[in-house]
Image (tube, rainbow, N blue to C red):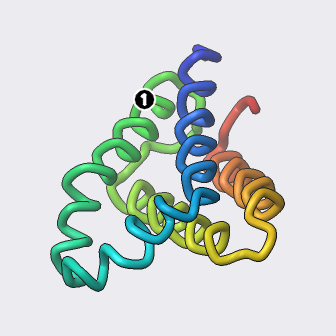
Amino acid sequence: MDERLLETVVAGVDLFLAECCEESFASIALREAPTALGWARWKEIEETYFLGLVRGALDALASDGSVGIPAADMTARMFLAALDEAGLAVSNSPTPRAECESARHVALQFLRGLGLRAG
């Protein structure tokens, strides 16, 4: 297993959650964008740009042997949805940094649930 690959995936999760602690990002990307763009367009953008990143990361972990199951499209969709919800919880928390740590822990648990062999 390539530890750098796993570190890259975890760094991506960390970066997203850290951005969710920033009010400007949270306000624009998480709260205003779905309303301003409309739900369908917002989801289209998310699928075009972010679903591919998540799917690629999970596929790489699966190909590398880091997770024990194939990273199917549904798995990527569910992980992305979980990250979206975690981001909202972080951004809406009165203690976003503490909520960020909790969200990071749960995201890693999600990956472990896929059979993550390290981390």
* Residue 92 position within the rendered picture, expressed as x and y whole percent measured from the top left: 64, 77
Q: Residue at x 24, y 81 (%)?
A: 36
How would you rate the neighbour count of disc 1 (Cα within 10 Å): few for under 14, some for 14-19, many for 20 or more? Answer: some
Q: Nearer the viewer, residue 89 or 32?
A: 32
Q: Is residue 26 left or right of residue 32?
A: right
Q: Is the residue 92 above or below the residue 26 in the image?
A: below
Can you tell which quarter of the image residue 88 is in? Answer: bottom right
**What residue is rendered at 28% in x and 61% in y?**
46
**At which x and y percent is residue 63?**
43, 26
Image quadrant in which the C terminus is located: top right
Foreground of the two, 72 or 87: 87
Closer to us: 87 or 24: 24
- Outermost residue to the front: 24
Left or right: residue 72 versus residue 7 is left
Q: Quadrant of the N terminus?
A: top right
Residue found at x 77% / y 64%: 99
Mark 1 highlights which residue? 60
Residue 74 lies, in percent from the top left, at 37, 62
Tell me the residue at 79%/53% (across/down). 101
For the residue pair 46 and 77, the one nearer the viewer reads as: 46
Tell me if 45 is positioned left or right of 5 in this view: left
Secondary structure under the numbered disc 1 in the rendered image:
helix
What's the residue type where badge 1 is placed? Ala
| In the image, residue 54 above or below residue 25 | above
Q: Is residue 75 left or right of residue 15?
A: left
Q: Position of residue 61 (x, y in %)?
A: 50, 31
How many numbered marks appear? 1
